[in-house]
Amino acid sequence: MYKAVINNSEFTVEKNKTKTFINNKAFNADVFTVKKNSFHLLMNNKSHSVVIINTNADEKTVLLTVNGKKIKAELKDEFDQLLKSLGI
């Protein structure tokens, strides 16, 4: 299980062989690659433009725009969560 922190909101993300779940709800979307780091997302009958601006593997962060709005996402894997729970 992963945790994603986006604009100070935390989400749980789980993936099995066929589906992805966000906060225990199935994530159903069609994602189309427009060009490198640029995607078109269809979700809940709405169209979204997503562009990845920067990724930082050391900090596990992604800076992107969704429909022109900048968003910073921080991803935490199980190891990161364990370290946090231990106060490290």
Image (cartoon, rainbow, N blue to C red):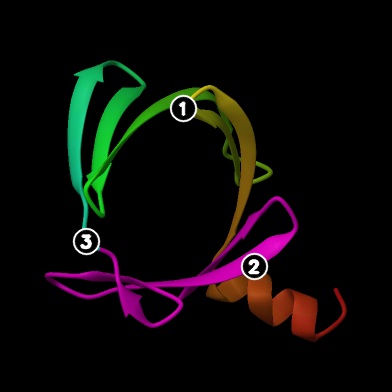
Element carrying mark 2: strand
- 26 vs 2, nearest the viewer: 26
Q: CA distance from mark 3 to mark 2?
A: 19 Å
For label 3, the crowd category at 10 Å Cα-Cα, with few meaning under 14, some 14 to 19 and many 20 or more, is few
Q: Earlier in the sequence, mark 1 or mark 3?
A: 3
Element carrying mark 1: loop
Give the residues drawn in magenta, as a range.
Answer: 1-27
- 29 vs 58, nearest the viewer: 29
71 on left or right of 51: right
19 on left or right of 72: left
SS assignment for the magenta stretch, majority:
strand
Residue 82 on image: x %, y %: 67, 81
Q: Are marks 1 and 3 in contact (CB under 8 Å)?
A: no
Q: Amino acid at mark 2?
A: Glu
Look at the image and tell me in which quarter the N terminus lies: bottom left
Q: Are marks 1 and 2 in contact (CB under 8 Å)?
A: no
Q: Amino acid at mark 3?
A: Asn
For label 1, the crowd category at 10 Å Cα-Cα, with few meaning under 14, some 14 to 19 and many 20 or more, is few
Q: Which residue is mark 3?
A: 28
In the displayed structure, 84 sits above or below 42; it is: below
Residue found at x 75% / y 58%: 8
Q: Amino acid at mark 1?
A: Asn
Q: Earlier in the sequence, mark 3 or mark 2?
A: 2
Residue 74 on image: x %, y %: 63, 51
Q: CA distance from mark 1 to mark 2?
A: 21 Å
Residue 21 on image: x %, y %: 33, 73
Looking at the rendered structure, which numbered label has been put on residue 67? 1
Q: Which residue is mark 2?
A: 10
Task: Determine if the magenta segment contains residue 5.
Answer: yes
Task: Determine if the magenta segment contains residue 7.
Answer: yes
| Quarter location, residue 69 | top right
For label 2, the crowd category at 10 Å Cα-Cα, with few meaning under 14, some 14 to 19 and many 20 or more, is some
